[in-house]
Amino acid sequence: MTTSGHNDPDNQADSIDPDVWLDRGFELFKLGRFDEALQAFDRGLQLAPNHPAPWCGRGRAFAELGRFNDALQAFDRGLELAPNEPGLWLDRGNVLFRLQRFDEALLAFDRGLELDPNEPGLWLGRGHALVELERFNDALQAFDRGLELAPNEPGLWLDRGNVLFRLQRFDEALQAYDRGLELAPNNPRLWLGRGKALFGLERFDEALQAYDRGLELAPNNPASGSVAATRSMDSADSMRR
């Protein structure tokens, strides 16, 4: 792999190394240039169709472009080539989740966890799938395991708070949101979650302050769209969103 290959891949990559296209694809992906990343991964696959990494990259690019069925096909091809790669099972689970195929997503996350039980992302995905299947206690266990592995991840504290809220364990939900806010004080979803928990505890003035802070941080966030309605609901109805 040479520097000139990166600078002018059209002239040199085909004759040098398919990894030039792989590297280029992931760099474009990081820049949010998903169409171009997809083209780079496809060029790499022309040279090395049995290399699982370009299939992984191809799937991720498709997912970012909202082409979830194409992404699934790419991940499945990658898994044919590397069936013991937990990252590909994570990717497969994530795209199945986006397709609302929650049972299949759970199976994918569980297969990944058989291979790597210490990957927080797999526990996160497992928890999300279990929430959608309304298995809230199992979801809580998954998020708690993820937090054992990544205790400073604010998104996991948000998820823990959300599932505790669904279980009507409002005090514990509030503690989870507050821990998340210690790590990410400008996260609007944590502030909105804090407002929900406080509402459930009938601490309405504090709930209003939390809602207002969330709206201040992200006035156009879809998660804030039901705030006004939530203020006027009782806690059981608001929990159903």
Image: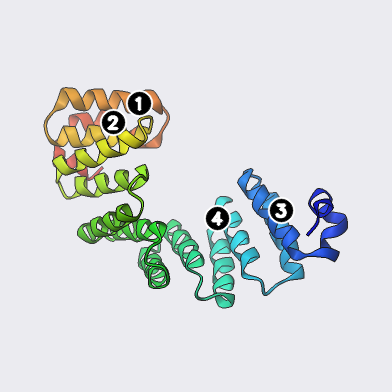
Residue bearing mark 4: 63
The Cα atoms of the two marked residues, 4 and 1, are separated by 29 Å
CB atoms of marks 3 and 1 within 8 Å: no
State which mark lies toward you, 1 or 2: 1
Check the picture and name the quadrant holding the N terminus: bottom right
Check the picture and name the quadrant holding the C terminus: top left
State which mark lies toward you, 3 or 1: 3
Q: Position of residue 132 (x, y in %)?
A: 31, 57
196 or 125, which is in the foreground?
125
Q: Could you tell which of marks 1 and 2 lies nearer the N-terminus?
A: 1
The Cα atoms of the two marked residues, 3 and 2, are separated by 43 Å
| Residue 41 occupies quadrant | bottom right
Residue bearing mark 1: 215
CB atoms of marks 3 and 2 within 8 Å: no
Residue bearing mark 2: 227
Q: Residues within 10 Å of mark 1 (few under 14, many from 20)?
A: many
CB atoms of marks 1 and 2 within 8 Å: yes
Q: Could you tell which of marks 3 and 2 lies nearer the N-terminus?
A: 3
Kindly state the secondary structure of the residue where label 4 is placed.
Answer: helix
Q: Amino acid at mark 3?
A: Arg
Q: How is the image coloured?
A: rainbow
The Cα atoms of the two marked residues, 1 and 2, are separated by 9 Å
Q: Amino acid at mark 2?
A: Val
Q: Say if residue 226 shows up in the picture.
A: no
State which mark lies toward you, 4 or 3: 3
Q: Could you tell which of marks 4 and 3 lies nearer the N-terminus?
A: 3
The Cα atoms of the two marked residues, 4 and 2, are separated by 30 Å
Residue bearing mark 3: 24
Q: Amino acid at mark 1?
A: Leu
Q: Residue at x 25, y 35 (%)?
A: 178
Q: Quick check: 82 left or right of 25?
A: left
